[in-house]
Each structure stands twice: as C-alpha cells, then as structure tokens.
Amino acid sequence: MTHHGPVVLADVVRNGFVEGTHVGHAVIVAPDGQVERAWGDPGAVIFPRSSNKPAQASAMVHAGLDLPPELLALTASSHSGEQFHLDGVARILDLAGLGEEALQTPPDLPLDPVERDSWIRQGRAPQSIAMNCSGKHASMLATCRANDWSIDDYLDPGHPLQLALTAHLAGLAGEPIAHVGMDGCGAPVLALTVAGLARSLSRIVQSPSGSPEHRVVAAMRAAPERVGGSRRDVTAFMRQVPGLVAKDGAEGVYALALEDGRAGALKVCDGSDRARIVACAALLIAMGVDDELVAEQRELPVLGGGHPVGRVRSPIE
C-alpha cells in the first residue's frame, strides 16, 4: 500500500480568507474490509481512544458480561455525565456487588457543559462516576466479577481482562496491536491503523444476530443518548441516520459504520473537535448518506462580533 502524508480534512475560512487548516487521515472500507477510498494514509497508526469501545464492549460480552441493552450501551459510551448516565453506571456496579469506590477512573466533572456548570454552581466536587469512561470501567469490573478475576488491578495491561480485550480488538481489526499506552481514563489504549479501526467496526455491525457484537450494536442503536448524551454530535448522527453505529474518540477520532457493513474512520492530527465533526459529516456524505442534519454538520459557523462571518468546512468529497 502506498503511504501518504496527512491531507486537509477541514478548512477554517473567515471573511473569505483561509485562516487555518486541520489535517489528518480518513478512510472508507467495504464490507469485506478492503479500502474503498482514502484521504491521507489509511495505514497511519493512531490511538483510536474511545472509538475502540464498541470492540471492547463486545469482548466483555464474550467474556461473560450480561447486561440489559440500556446498560450495555453505557459500556460502549463516552457519556456526558447526565443523571441518567450516572444512574446507569451505578446500576452496573450494583449488579456486580460493587460501589463507586471500585472505579479507578480519575475523579472528574461531567463532560457535558450544561451538567458541568450545574455541578460547579452546586459546589460539587469531581467524582469518579462522572468521568466519561465510567460506563466502560464499571462494565470491566462486572466482567471481572463474572470470571472471578481480581478487581484491584483490572487496568493492568497484563490482567486477564485486558489481554482478552486486546486479542479481540486485534482479531476484529485484522492486524496486530501496534502500540499500547494509557488512555485518559487510566485503561490501556491500543493503537491501530485508521483502516484497521474502520475494519473493526465493519465486522462488528456484520456479526450475526444474537452474537456479542450484535448485542452491542443493537444496544447502541436503541439508546444513542447513552453512547454520548443529549447534546452530543455522536448521538445526533446515530439518531438521524438509520442503522448507523458511530463512536467518537478523543484527539480528533471518529469511527462509523452503516448497516450494509461499509465503515469509515478518521483522525484529525491536531485533535480538533470542530474538524472532527465536519469531517465525520463529510465522510458520511461520501458514503452516500443523504440527510439534512448530516449536510448541515458538514459546515460549522465562524463568528465575528457574534455574527457568522465564515465557516469550518470539510473538503472531503
């Protein structure tokens, strides 16, 4: 495969002047996992961050995690910290016979700005359960309980839980894990190529009914507000596009897959959220999605004096 450098995934235009650009890599894979189209280098190795969560959630179900759909959606989430998210995480812990003190997520305020401001006004301190990865961590603990594995060291890369998650992700991606690091939540983060990330989600959505992978995607589709939140772009995309499974990740990552098994993934090199959103919308359009909300998200306004004077737009065609 020919390797290329990053390309422009989003332009920032102010009053007709290109003020800045966000570069990165994007790819679309066919249902068989072959690269259909690419911008930049589909072989670029990245940390997918939370975009790995659908694969990790399905690995936990393979390992014995058994949750109702609304809680399984939280397993694959980077939730906004709304009350229904926190209540759901507490339920997962309770089903495992554990309390919040078992979570090893760093204490944090809710990700959602409305919820965060409310906590600050109330003088509430950061909590481990409010951290956006607490759904995954609670489910990791529940999986350990189901297997009688130790819980104090559940984040150790050599723990049986983490070894199972690593092997499962590599199998779905069809490639070895290129690097292991520590994610913001303290869990291992596993590096893949951009194409490997897209391929992993493609295989998940094509899994047979009743399989662990199918259970995860069905849960995500049924409760997209639990995957993200009431005011999150990932939730809006999943609500709007029938059958879409999408998962955002920190530092400018997105993975998405349609019902037919075609999938896409992207990485914005500078980690920009605004570029990630418009590039995701453009990638969906390139995959044939014809939807008004998606088209609107392909451009975000640039303000001057409180009024639109330009746009952030993706050139992906």
Image (cartoon, grey):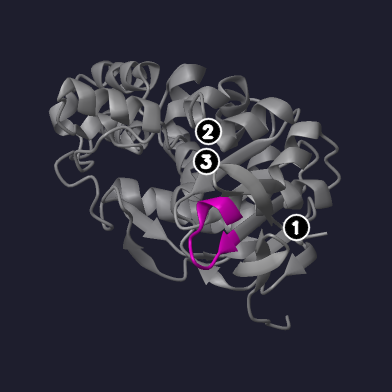
Which residue lies under the disc numbered 3?
54
**Residue type of the residue flagged with mark 2:** Arg
Q: Which mark is residue 28?
A: 1
In the picture, the disc for residue 232 is 2
Magenta stretch, residue numbers: 267-275
Q: Secondary structure at mark 2?
A: loop
- The quarter of the picture where residue 129 lies is top left
Q: Nearer the viewer, residue 189 or 226?
A: 226
At x 51% / y 58%, what residue is drawn?
272
| Residue 23 left/right relative to 271 | right
**Residue lying at 46% horizontally and 37% vertically, measured from the top left:** 57
Q: Position of residue 15 (x, y in %)?
A: 69, 60
Residue 228 in view in this figure: yes
Between tags 1 and 2, which lies in front? 2
Q: CA distance from mark 1 to mark 2?
A: 23 Å
**For residue 222: magenta?**
no
**Distance between mark 1 and mark 3 Cα atoms:** 18 Å
Q: Amino acid at mark 3?
A: Pro
Residue 270 painted magenta = yes
